[in-house]
Image (cartoon, grey):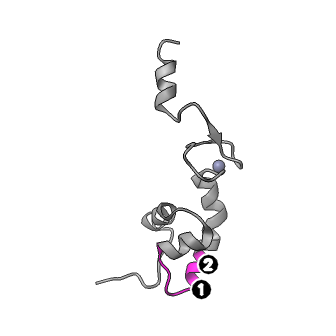
Amino acid sequence: MSYSHLTFLNEDGPVVKHCSKCGCRIPVSSHYDQCKECMKKELFPKVKEFINENYDVNEMIVAQEFGIDRSIIHEWVREGHLEYKMLPKF
Ligand SMILES: [Zn+2]
């Protein structure tokens, strides 16, 4: 028990949140009640469809449309899951 107090404070703070789907721990600072993985599973097909149907989309538009953080969309794009149709290629 000598280190648990410090470790505890260094992690998520006193309050712990859990994903409503899989029950894994999510950051307390998260505005969502699901972890990124579950959000991805649920939203990804919709986001992909949205991008396929709309030529002129970017991270900001997608984020607004689905009410999720831009950084999440950005991550999907960076991981290669999503591709914009208007991707600038030089
Ligand atoms: Zn989850």
Q: Residue visible at 52% across and 26% down?
A: 8
**Residue 53 on the magenta segment:** yes
Q: Quadrant of residue 79?
A: bottom left
Asked if the residues shown at circle 1 and circle 2 are in contact, with their CB atoms under 8 angstroms apart, the answer is yes
Please tell me whether residue 87 is drawn above or below residue 22 in the rendered image.
below
**Mark 1 belongs to which amino acid?**
Glu
Please tell me whether residue 54 is drawn above or below residue 13 in the rendered image.
below
Is disc 2 surrounded by few (<14), some (14 to 19) or many (20+) residues within 10 Å? few
Residue interval drawn in magenta: 48-59
Q: Residue visible at 58% across and 75% down?
A: 48
x then y, percent, for residue 90: 28, 84
Spatial CA span between label 1 and label 2:
6 Å
Closer to the camera, 22 or 17? 17
**Mark 2 belongs to which amino acid?**
Glu
What secondary structure is found at the residue carrying circle 2? helix
Closer to the camera, 77 or 67? 67
**Residue to which mark 1 is pinned:** 53
**Residue to which mark 2 is pinned:** 49
